[in-house]
Amino acid sequence: MSVEDRTRLNRRAFLGTAAAGLGAGLSPAFAMNGSTEMDASVAAGSVRNNVSSFRMLRWQDYFDNTRNGAILVDLTSRALHYWSDDQATYRLYPTSVPLSEDLTRRGRTEVVQKVVAPSWRPTPSMKERNPEWPDVVEGGSPDNPLGSHALYLSWTYYRIHGTHDTRKIGRRSSNGCVGLYNEHISELFAMTKVGTQVLLI
């Protein structure tokens, strides 16, 4: 065996061993805690950053039916679940969620309006906290907090919308709304209709 073959073999063996070790180190031990979140056992002193912690769910556990489609948002696991009217389609998306409990709303609502390239206006309380913010950011603007699409809910000021700032997904980062990657809100937008049921838990 030539030196070059031994080097190639040693490199391959090293990479294989490293990948196996890394994979074993990342395999979480899951335990359900009442939300849709999965708790991964974490070594003492280590930090969990945006660990994917959601699982597939059954619509029957949350809705009486899927008439007009159904959206479940789990604020703990930061996940949005969608079931189509005929239950043939199920989607699971990572989300951003409100920064704090006082900005959070839970319960049943529905989609009342669908808007492509929505304009954004700060709520009165946002403007009070941040008077330097603009009164409006037009749809299509790269700094528009609502991203490419928005599903308006029956609750005033609450939306499920896209975001151009992808760092927000998987974090507590909103002023009350639920944010998705723009490609995900675009897909969800196409599947939902006015009247789609929404439940935030």
Image: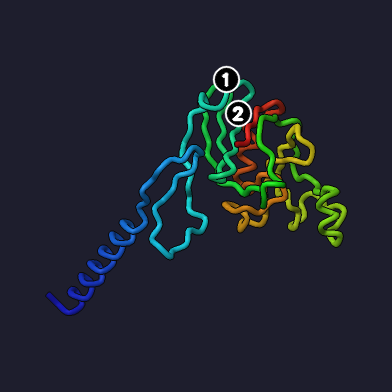
Q: Is residue 150 left or right of residue 97?
A: right
Q: Which tag, 2 or 1, sits closer to the chain's start? A: 1
Q: Nearer the viewer, residue 185 or 64?
A: 64
How many numbered marks are there?
Answer: 2
Residue at far left of view? 1
Q: Is residue 130 left or right of residue 164?
A: right
Q: Nearer the viewer, residue 114 or 81?
A: 81
Residue 84: x and y in percent read 57, 27
Q: Residues within 10 Å of mark 2 (few under 14, many from 20)?
A: many
Amino acid type indicated by mark 1: Asp
Q: Is residue 90 left or right of residue 168?
A: left
Residue 170: x and y in percent read 57, 52
The figure's colour scheme reads rainbow
Asked if residue 43 is positioned above or below residue 7 in the image, the reply reads above
Residue at image point 58% right, 22% down: 66
**Residue 142: which quarter of the image?**
bottom right
Residue at image point 35% right, 52% down: 27
Disc 2 and disc 1 in contact, CB within 8 angstroms: no
Residue at image point 28% right, 59% down: 20
Q: Nearer the viewer, mark 2 or mark 1?
A: 1
The kind of secondary structure element at disc 1 is loop
Q: Nearer the viewer, residue 7 or 22?
A: 22
Residue 51: x and y in percent read 48, 53
Residue carrying label 1? 64
Residue carrying label 2? 70
**Residue 156: which quarter of the image?**
top right
Amino acid type indicated by mark 2: Ala
Residue 155: x and y in percent read 76, 35
The kind of secondary structure element at disc 2 is strand
Residue at image point 29% right, 61% down: 21
Q: Residues within 10 Å of mark 1 (few under 14, many from 20)?
A: few
Q: Assign the C terminus to one quadrant of the image.
A: top right
